[in-house]
Amino acid sequence: MPDPSPLLHLAVALDGAGWHPAAWREPQARPRELLTARYWYDLVAEAERGLLDFVTIEDSLGPQSYDRSGPDQRTDQVRGRLDAVLVAARVAPLAHHIGLVPIVVVTHTEPFHLAKAVATLDYASTGRAGVQVRVSARPDEAAHFGRRHIAPVDFADLEAAPARQLLLDLFDEATEYVEVLRRLWDSWEDDAEIRDVATGRFIDRDKLHYIDFEGRWFSVRGPSITPRPPQGQPVVSALAHQSVPYRLVARSADLGYVTPHDRDQARAIVSEVRAEQAVAGRSGQTVHLFGDLVVFLDDTTSAAEARKSRLDERSGGPYQSDAKVFVGTATELADLLQDWQQAGLTGFRLRPGTVPYDLEQITRVLVPELRRRQVFRAAYGADTLRGLLGLDRPGNRYADAAAPHSFAEGSPRP
């Protein structure tokens, strides 16, 4: 008999009332509670009941918009959101197994601040933190900070020189940003804190390290002010649609979200990312590739189609997405996931069209179907997000560092 398929990894992407712009008008929606901790805890708790690996929490530096270049000025859709890292930190002590992965725009933020925030989230969640790094090419978001000017470009033509150069710069910067994050997380050795009351020694200064990072975009001395996170390195992920961001995933991430629309495209994407991994010298490392899909699920395909049509009518046009939009039953979706798994994807991140309805279809209908097929876990089997994803806890790159890079006697105190 052939070997059974490996277990699928499964995550959900949470965004307001759901990914359809009219989702907030559904009978089960809770639009008055979108900015409350209870609302977000309820969503995460539902995902955890479904034994999902993790949730991602959407965020941005500008209002939600269908126009990728800036605000679309619409007033009939959800606008405004909470900070994703803070939402994750608030929910973390209330959840017990599921990973928490906030989205952070790295284009206008500082890696030192994010390293500290995500390390703190890892402590608050006892080892279940991750982060999805995102770049921003929106001029209106750049204007919030006043540090750089980003000229409008036509992203419908990514091969045009202005768009391509901006894309290259943004993702090169993001790659450097992730390297700084990882070095800062390693700047404290795991046993740097002694906490010995009898001798009065709280910290071993030889086990804190300058990272002395000098790059094109960042110059960071270090060390972090937060001890090494429980996972050593929280999980780093990124969304990638084409070759330039594929390189970011291959070189720097633990996990990439990709957006194929069929199995052949999924296979081609996987091949390209794996080739980039080899170029980066990471062939022996696990880099998960999750397929992203927006899902509208119901008891029958016709019921799912009717519900989506009603939502489209309310929003003034057919819903469109960067990812494939799946409309049908959980059984049909399970068929698709297993089919695409054969192309080399190791998991999937599902974007519920509406919440709580489509989220509950995932956790209460799709997951039992995948378990019946023996391709999804029956219980949580690890205490950390890295553990759930089968990723080893990495060693510390500075553990054997030479004395000049550490806080030896006579060095300035941290």
Image: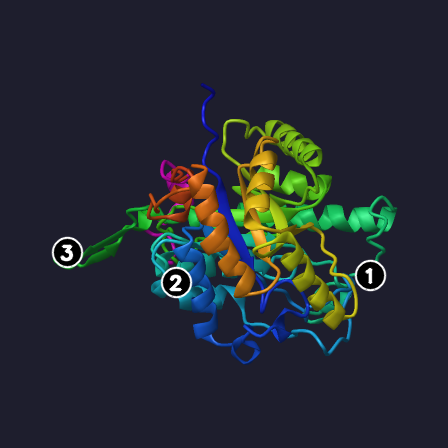
As helix, strand or loop, the secondary structure at mark 3 comes to: loop
Looking at numbered disc 2 in the image, what kind of residue is underneath it? Ala
- Expressed as whole percent of the image width and height from the top left, the position of residue 207 reads 33, 46
* Label disc, if present, on residue 3 of the rendered structure: none
Mark sitting earlier along the chain (1/3)? 1
As helix, strand or loop, the secondary structure at mark 1 comes to: loop
Q: Residue at x 84, y 57 (%)?
A: 153
Distance from Cα at disc 2 to Cα at disc 1: 38 Å
Q: Residue at x 40, y 53 (%)?
A: 128
Looking at numbered disc 3 in the image, what kind of residue is underneath it? Thr
**Disc 2 marks which residue?**
92
**Disc 1 marks which residue?**
151
Mark sitting earlier along the chain (2/1)? 2
Looking at numbered disc 1 in the image, what kind of residue is underneath it? Ala
- Expressed as whole percent of the image width and height from the top left, the position of residue 105 reads 61, 59
Quadrant for residue 66, please give it: bottom right
Q: How would you rate the neighbour count of disc 1 (Cα within 10 Å): few for under 14, some for 14-19, many for 20 or more?
A: some
Asked whether residue 387 is drawn in magenta, I would say: no
Contact flag, marks 2 and 3 (Cβ < 8 Å):
no
**Disc 3 marks which residue?**
199
Residue 38 versus residue 2 in the image, above or below = below
Q: How would you rate the neighbour count of disc 3 (Cα within 10 Å): few for under 14, some for 14-19, many for 20 or more?
A: few
Asked whether residue 413 is drawn in magenta, I would say: yes
Range of the magenta residues? 397-414
Residue depth check, mark 2 versus mark 1: number of the one nearer the observer: 2
- Residue 372 visible (yes or no): yes
Q: Residue furthest left?
A: 198
Q: Residue at x 55, y 49 (%)?
A: 330
Contact flag, marks 1 and 3 (Cβ < 8 Å):
no
